[in-house]
């Protein structure tokens, strides 16, 4: 009934060159030169020295980040818990309403 059309590969037009052939070459041993002595690279940026004030600032900043992230996660958990509890209360109320309606009939 419905058959998909499969496109055909277009044939190349114009001048087509055949693939080049690779000829093997002989490997000639050469005189081995000893590697140069490694030199220590020059530092690209200055070394950061930590002072007691800098360490205190880093610890304070890290503590603040941990406290903020913790507060956000706890508030999200609390929101999920409150939502779950409210959905449970609504389910119990609806169940009792439906049960009382069937008893009246």
Image: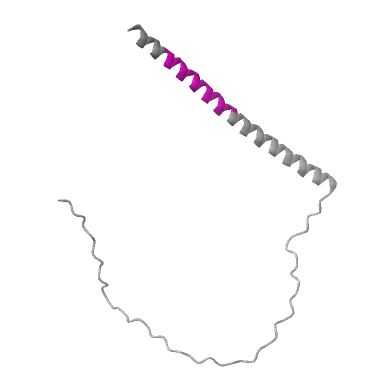
**Picture layout, residue 74 above or below residue 29:** above
Q: On the image, which quarter does residue 28 sit in? A: bottom right
Q: Position of residue 52 (x, y in %)?
A: 84, 46
Between 16 and 38, the one lying in front of the other is 38
Magenta segment's dominant SS is helix
Q: Residue furthest front?
A: 103
> Number of callouts in the render?
0
Assess whether residue 1 is covered by the magenta stretch: no
Between 23 and 71, the one lying in front of the other is 71
Q: Residue furthest right?
A: 52
- Which residue is drawn at the image coordinates 81% and 54% (left, top)? 49
Q: Position of residue 85 (x, y in %)?
A: 53, 22
Q: On the image, which quarter does residue 8 sit in? A: bottom left
Between 17 and 76, the one lying in front of the other is 76
Q: Position of residue 12 (x, y in %)?
A: 27, 72
Assess whether residue 87 is covered by the magenta stretch: yes
Image quadrant where one finds the C terminus: top left
What residue span does the magenta drawing correspond to? 78-96
């Amino acid at each position: 009934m419905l058959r998909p059309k499969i496109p055909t590969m277009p044939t190349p037009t114009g001048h087509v060159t055949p693939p080049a052939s690779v000829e093997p070459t002989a490997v000639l041993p050469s005189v081995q030169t000893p590697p140069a002595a490694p030199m220590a690279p020059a530092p690209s940026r200055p070394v950061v020295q930590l002072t007691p004030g800098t360490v205190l600032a880093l610890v304070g900043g890290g503590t603040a980040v941990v406290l903020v992230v913790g507060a956000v996660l706890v508030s999200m958990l609390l929101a999920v818990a409150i939502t779950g509890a409210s959905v449970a209360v609504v389910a119990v109320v609806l169940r009792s309403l439906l049960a009382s309606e069937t008893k009246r009939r």
